[in-house]
Image (cartoon, rainbow, N blue to C red):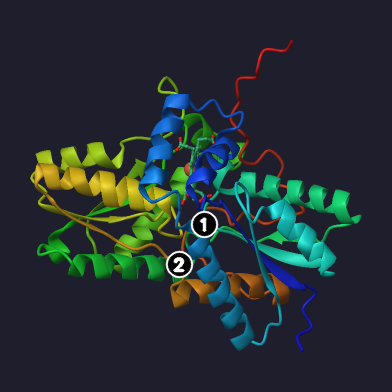
Amino acid sequence: MSTTPYDAVLVLSFGGPEARDEVRPFLENVTRGRGVPPERLDEVEEHYQHFGGVSPINALNRELVAALRRELTDAGLELPVYFGNRNWHPFAEDTVTEMANDGVRNALVLATSAYGGYSACRQYHEDIARAREAATERTGGAPDLTKLRHFYDHPLFVESVADGVRAAREKLDAGHDARLVFTAHSIPISADETAGLPDEGGHRYSRQMAEAAQLVADAVGATDHDLVWQSRSGPPQIPWLEPDIVDHLDTLHGKGVRAVVVSPVGFVSDHLEVVWDLDNEAAEHAEEIGIGFARAGSAGSDPRFVRMIVELIREQVEGAEARTLGSAPRAGVGCNGSLCAPGCCEPPVRRRPASS
Ligand SMILES: CC1=C(CCC(=O)O)c2cc3nc(cc4[nH]c(cc5[nH]c(cc1n2)c(C)c5CCC(=O)O)c(CCC(=O)O)c4C)C(CCC(=O)O)=C3C
Ligand SMILES: [Fe+2]
């Protein structure tokens, strides 16, 4: 028996549809009140319908949950693992209600994002608060929920991403000569400016991303690499982080680059934005312009990644040392939706609907 004050773990993720008729309601959940134009939604709906309406993300998370259960058991930590999402079934509201009904009182939360920023961190704090409110309304109480920290620079995360790069290189004739390109989800420039704390100068999202890319590049012995963006959303008049991976392929081609390895370091699994935006769009474009293309796998359920999660849990349970390779302030921890620090990752200002 362990003596941990914690009694469960919640894997908290983005969620994705698993049937054709789930796509539109899922997209409406994701974009409610966010000013994403309907034309963009139509386009993204097609990406999902291309795969029969099934995003890989839930299945990948279920695999991760299964692997985490095994790893916790092996580590002698008796913590049941639950799974809930922000935007689709199983919704975090329902999962936290189930946890309350099961008698869970004090759980740790792994959000499936390695980074800071509004979408990548603060929104998960908001999900936690919302899910606890729902559980409280339905059952009269909710477990305390403590979110684990950012892990973009954890050596085991870096190693699992680096291995993906090594495997992708093997698929290319150019191998080690292929240009190493990292991608992450673009966000509005204004959201990057307010990522982290004002007194650290903002930009925590893009800075952590740059550090993660550098750490992986070092691990695979790459002397050069680029960090570019993918999956831009939102109205065209609002500036987002650039360049986009597809445009960047043209730039590299113009410089005489013959092959690229693309590593989606900004994501922890090969979900729909990876398989569509990279394996379809970017790979097709690379073929059109005649440069070699191999996509590196993300952390997924890599054994080192799963071991890393157990290390993050041990940091909270036993005060185990936090292994970090980067220089950004360690952050991301909060209880019951309280932020890492006041004023951290302020949400972007949104247009409000005209009041009646
Ligand atoms: C930083 C970041 C991450 C990484 C951190 C994390 O992983 O949490 C992430 C992950 C993901 N984003 C995903 C899907 C979508 N994101 C959208 C829209 C947006 N993402 C944004 C940011 C991020 N997104 C933003 C600023 C928007 C604009 C709307 C808004 O201000 O909130 C839209 C709307 C349609 C469109 O693309 O326009 C969809 C469908 C999926 C699921 C894929 C699957 O189903 O397998 C995942 C994992
Ligand atoms: Fe997204």
Q: Confirm or reject: label 1 Cβ below 8 Å from ligand 1.
A: no
Disc ID at residue 157? 2
Disc ID at residue 114? 1
Pointer 1: residues within 10 angstroms few (<14), some, or many (20+)?
A: many
- Amino acid type, callout 2: Phe
Q: Position of residue 200 (x, y in %)?
A: 56, 42
Task: Indicate which disc, 1 or 2, sits on the residue closer to the N terminus.
Answer: 1
Which residue is painted at 43% across and 38% down in the image? 45
- Amino acid type, callout 1: Ala
Q: Position of residue 139 (x, y in %)?
A: 88, 56
Query: Residue lying farthest top?
Result: 356
Viewer-proximal residue among 295 and 155: 295
On screen, residue 290 versus residue 293, left or right, reads left
Residue 264 vertical placement versus 71 (above, below): above
Query: Residue lying farthest right?
Result: 140
Pointer 2: residues within 10 angstroms few (<14), some, or many (20+)?
A: many
Question: In what element is the residue under mark 1?
Answer: loop
Q: Position of residue 83 (x, y in %)?
A: 64, 63
**Residue 239 visible from this viewpoint:** no
Question: In what element is the residue under mark 2?
Answer: helix
